[in-house]
Image (tube, grey):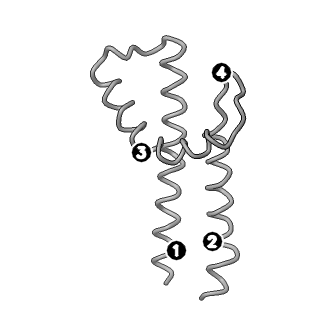
Amino acid sequence: MIALFQTIDLVLGLLTWLIIGSAILSWLIAFGVVNMRNDVVRAIYDVLSRLTEPLLRPIRNILPNLGGIDISPIVLLLLIFFLRSFLMNDVAPAVL
């Protein structure tokens, strides 16, 4: 049972880094630091988008329009941090 909780925690940790990487890359593209015409940048952006967009899209549909500011990654990161804390501090000790 410990292995299951550790695996869930690992997946949530990896997802956290993917969301952070996706947000940073989108900022770099928006400010013109990196160029989307570069094949490597486009490939990395495509992979990060395919992994994070299914989770971010429902949050974007719920949040009000804030103009050009997208806070859905922040909301998702808060949800992941809450879930990790809840699993490790409340669920795991009760089950084990």
Pointer 1 local density, CA inside 10 Å: few below 14, some 14–19, many at least 20: some
User: Is the C-beta separation of discs 2 and 1 under 8 Å?
Assistant: yes
Instruction: Locate residue 67, reporting x and y percent.
Output: 69, 22
**Amino acid at dot 3:** Leu
- Helix, strand or loop at disc 3? helix
**Amino acid at dot 2:** Leu
Identify the disc placed on residue 5.
1
Residue indicated by mark 2: 87
Identify the disc placed on residue 51.
3
Please name which of the two marks, 2 or 4, marks the residue nearer to the observer: 4
**Amino acid at dot 4:** Gly
Mark nearer the N terminus (4 vs 1): 1
Mark nearer the N terminus (1 vs 3): 1
Cα separation, mark 2 vs mark 1, equals 7 Å
User: Is the C-beta separation of discs 4 and 1 under 8 Å?
Assistant: no
- Helix, strand or loop at disc 1? helix
Q: Please tell me which residue is depicted at 29% across the width and 25% down the height of the picture.
A: 40
Please name which of the two marks, 4 or 3, marks the residue nearer to the observer: 4
Examine the rendered structure and indicate whether residue 93 appears above or below residue 12.
below
Cα separation, mark 4 vs mark 3, equals 22 Å
Cα separation, mark 2 vs mark 4, equals 34 Å
Examine the rendered structure and indicate whether residue 37 appears above or below residue 80.
above
Cα separation, mark 3 vs mark 2, equals 23 Å
The quarter holding residue 71 reads top right
- Helix, strand or loop at disc 2? helix
Pointer 2 local density, CA inside 10 Å: few below 14, some 14–19, many at least 20: some
**Amino acid at dot 1:** Phe
Mark nearer the N terminus (2 vs 1): 1
Work out which quarter of the rendered image holds the C terminus and state it: bottom right
Question: Residue 17 vs residue 48: left or right?
Answer: right
Mark nearer the N terminus (2 vs 4): 4
